[in-house]
Image: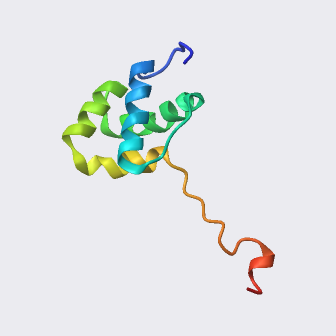
Amino acid sequence: MQEQLREFSFCQPGFRECTQYIVQKSGIRLADSKDSMVYSRLARRLRALKIASVSAYLKYLEANKTEEQQFINALTTNLTSFYREKHHFPI
């Protein structure tokens, strides 16, 4: 993970904790190269909740289980391709 000037504190241990949590809760494994994606998507939640760092958010997440769905939604991309290609319509 490159050191960058970021709005929120985000380091390698925080990234690892995020990836471990998402695997544990959803079975989704994120590659090490997804650190920027994880940061940008979690930054939206931090702003919304007025939380100052990713580590503080992870503590919040542990204490507030209702936030788990928001965390999972933030880190996943929902794509439905069913019936989006012409050859599916006759079937």
In this orientation, which residue lies closer to the viewer: 9 or 81?
A: 81
Residue 39, x across and y down, in percent: 48, 30
Q: Is residue 74 visible?
A: yes
Q: Quadrant of the N terminus?
A: top right
Q: How is the image coloured?
A: rainbow
Foreground residue, 36 or 15?
15
| Residue name at image x 80 percent, y 77 percent | 87
Does residue 65 lie above or below 10 as drawn? below
- Most extreme residue toward the left is 63
Task: Say which of 14 and 26 sits in front.
Answer: 26
13 left or right of 35 in image: left
Q: Residue at x 53, y 28 (%)?
A: 35
The image shows residue 4 at horizontal and vertical percentages of 54, 15
Determine whether 38 is above or below 12 in the image.
below
Residue 54's image quarter? top left
**Count the marks: how many?**
0
Whether residue 11 is visible, yes or no, is no
Residue 21 lies in quadrant: top left
Q: How far from the left and from the top, in percent, is residue 65?
A: 23, 47
Horizontal placement of 10 versus 66: left or right?
right
Image coords of residue 70 (percent x, y): 37, 49
As drawn, 74 above or below 51: below
Which quarter of the rendered picture does the C terminus lie within?
Answer: bottom right
**Is residue 41 rendered to the left or right of residue 20?**
right
Which residue ends up furthest to the bottom in the rendered image? Answer: 90
Q: Residue at x 52, y 38 (%)?
A: 30
45 left or right of 32 in image: left
